[in-house]
Amino acid sequence: MKRFEQFLLTCIGLDARSLGTQVLERIIQERLLATRSPDRDAYWQLLKRSTAEQKILIEAVVVPETWFFRDPEALLALAKLAQRRLLQIRPDQGLRLLSLPCSSGEEPYSMAMALLDTGIAAQRFRIDAIDISGRGVDQARRGIYGSNAFRGRTLDYRARHFTVQNNNQHRLNDNVRACVELRQGNLFDASLLASAGPYDFIFCRNVLIYLDSAHQRQTAVLLEALLAEGGALFVGPSETPVLLRHGMQSLGLPLAFAFARGPAPASPQPPTPDAAAVRARPVLPSMAALRIQPATPAPATLEQAHRLADQGRWDEALALCEQLLHDAPRPAGGDLAALYYLLALIHDARGDALTADKLLRKTLYLESDHEGAMAHLAALLDLQGDRNGAAQLRQRARRVLQKQAK
Ligand SMILES: C[S@@+](CC[C@H](N)C(=O)[O-])C[C@H]1O[C@@H](n2cnc3c(N)ncnc32)[C@H](O)[C@@H]1O
């Protein structure tokens, strides 16, 4: 098994443990049958000489999970930051954006819709979208999507930007498709982005979690080099530790997971890298300063706590959460889970990973399919060196997502 793991690591940076070893075992077994290889040695020889088989194996191991407006706060933040940046550049200049990996297109198309909906003309931005999966890129080029791609609670963009077809599939309108330039490519192919950049905004979301630490570092170096001065890099909820370790600077937009180029300015109290980066003064305005409202309105007091957290006013946000927790009537069910989750984010931002860990477990106790809590807890377990625990949690998150998609 080791040689297959090594092949995938060298080729696409995949840490097989992130899938669970049994998953890779099963995939190899399926490929053995499909290629009529009598045993693993024979299949290994075939894999070494056939680029076609290499592509098939890579398609089989990548996780293409994605949907429109995944983490809406990131897209809202993008739209606001883009508006602001356009005011700083010449009117004849446009914004350059990158979505890598783009999977089947939901992410770059959401970026385009978010910018168009905020009133930015299509001529003023261009999105490059890249993924290693030929199947994903082909699907993105077709621009036709089933219900699986629409999972959020707010789907108003669908009526604006899609046309319903007879078979209940949704076809993305041409004006949005035209904003995105799709390409198949490997993040670890040195020539892929050699002459690209700088990009004003980069989305590299939900791929770092599948890479080993060396490839995570390599990716962070590449992305930082591609990012324009004053630009923003967005990652997935559980991927922030990778950039914090790399010295990039959190923009302090809690649910947007956005970073500016490092190094972070020196902090008066440097406890952990996470806390130092989160406390660092944002170079771009906070969510609150940009008047970004949470996509789903929360009860007033929880919303206040969110707003304080958005401004990096951790102590006040914490005090308000504690008050909510202890005052009658105590929140229950989903509200209590949301409160524990916010508390976990605050403690993590303040550098108290241990308390954040406990609170994330409480969130999951109350709401076992809370995707954000699973992702954050997996990231904390990774930092503690518990790779197996983190992988199990990510597997669980994947199962939940698959169930939700059905
Ligand atoms: C979970 S999806 C994330 C898609 C999107 N960014 C999102 O957050 O919804 C992960 C994607 O990473 C792609 N991928 C994995 N390794 C890659 C590599 N080395 N180069 C480019 N894409 C890669 C996979 O094909 C898959 O489509």
Image (spheres, rainbow, N blue to C red):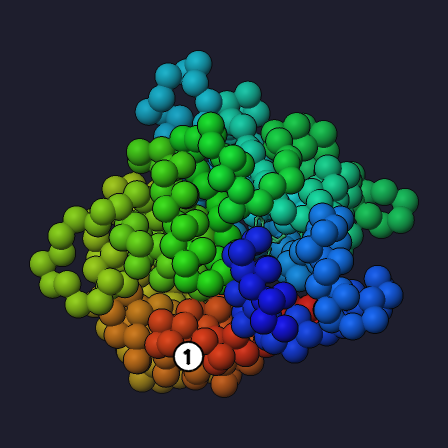
Residue 377, x across and y down, in percent: 43, 74
Instruction: Give the SS element for disc 1.
Output: loop
How crowded pointer 1 is (Cα within 10 Å; few <14, some 14-19, many 20+) is rated as few
Residue 151, x across and y down, in percent: 66, 58
Taking the spot 75% from the left edge, 64% from the top edge, the residue there is 43
Residue 286, x across and y down, in percent: 31, 47
Point out the image quarter for the C terminus.
bottom right
Q: Quadrant of residue 403?
A: bottom right
Q: Is residue 172 left or right of residue 81?
A: right
Q: Quadrant of residue 346?
A: bottom left
Relative height, residue 231 to residue 90 (above, below): below
Relative height, residue 345 to residue 328 (above, below): above
Q: Quadrant of residue 268?
A: bottom left
Relative height, residue 332 to residue 154 (above, below): below
- Can you name the residue that lies furthest to the top here? 92
Of residues 335 and 40, the one drawn nearer to the viewer in this rendering: 40
Residue 216, x across and y down, in percent: 43, 56
Does the Cβ of the disc 1 residue fall within 8 Å of ligand 1? no
Of residues 318 and 235, the one drawn nearer to the viewer in this rendering: 235
Taking the spot 65% from the left edge, 78% from the top edge, the residue there is 22
Q: Is residue 73 visible?
A: no
Q: Which amino acid, by three-letter code, is at mark 1?
A: Asp
Q: Is residue 239 left or right of residue 51?
A: left
Q: Is residue 139 left or right of residue 393?
A: right
Taking the spot 27% from the left edge, 53% from the top edge, the residue there is 247
Q: Is residue 293 left or right of residue 394?
A: left
Of residues 179 and 216, the one drawn nearer to the viewer in this rendering: 216
Taking the spot 17% from the left edge, 48% from the top edge, the residue there is 265
- Can you name the residue that lies furthest to the right here? 166
Q: Is residue 215 visible?
A: yes
Q: Residue beneath label 1, please?
A: 386
